[in-house]
């Protein structure tokens, strides 16, 4: 093995040089090996894409969880404000009734 060049690089170069020959010029075992190597590369690509999509999906799940938490906080705050408003309306109504009873 040449220094600085991993086995994968050497086998890739060999596969590429063999793949440039017409398939009829190669023996059936070499053709099979080339096809297996091509399928292995496709599988690696698909696995990488799947991993990337899994990461994107996880990121989206985190965003959804954060938005649900934010929504829950906003609903809670809105409920609190509504209760405060109802209490103020009740106080104003009672105050108005008290003033009317004085007349």
Image: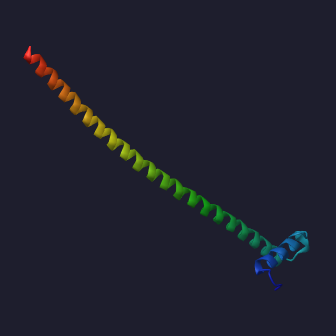
Q: List x then y, in percent, for residue 6.
A: 77, 80
- In this rendering, the answer to whether 26 lies above or below 73 is below
The C terminus sits in image quarter: top left
* Nearest the eye: 44 or 65: 65
For the point 40% across and 50% down, which residue is it?
69
Determine which quarter of the picture holds residue 50: bottom right
The N terminus sits in image quarter: bottom right
Q: List x then y, in percent, for residue 47.
A: 64, 65
* Nearest the eye: 65 or 101: 101
- In this rendering, the answer to whether 41 lies above or below 58 is below
For the point 47% across and 51% down, which residue is it?
64
- In this rendering, the answer to whether 93 lies above or below 62 is above
**Residue found farthest to the top:** 103
- In this rendering, the answer to whether 74 lies above or below 97 is below
Asked if residue 85 lies left or right of residue 11, the reply is left
**Residue found farthest to the left:** 102
For the point 41% across and 47% down, which residue is it?
70
Determine which quarter of the picture holds residue 15: bottom right
For the point 35% across and 42% down, which residue is it?
75
Asked if residue 63 lies left or right of residue 49, the reply is left
């Amino acid at each position: 093995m040449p220094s600085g060049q991993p086995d994968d690089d050497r086998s890739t170069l060999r596969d590429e040089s063999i793949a440039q020959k017409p398939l009829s010029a190669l023996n059936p075992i070499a053709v099979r090996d080339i096809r297996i190597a091509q399928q292995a590369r496709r599988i690696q690509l698909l696995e990488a894409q799947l991993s990337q999509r899994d990461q994107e999906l996880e990121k989206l799940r985190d965003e959804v969880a954060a938005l649900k938490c934010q929504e829950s906080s906003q609903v809670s705050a809105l409920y609190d404000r509504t209760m405060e408003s109802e209490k103020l309306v009740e106080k104003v109504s009672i105050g108005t009734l008290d003033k009317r009873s004085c007349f």
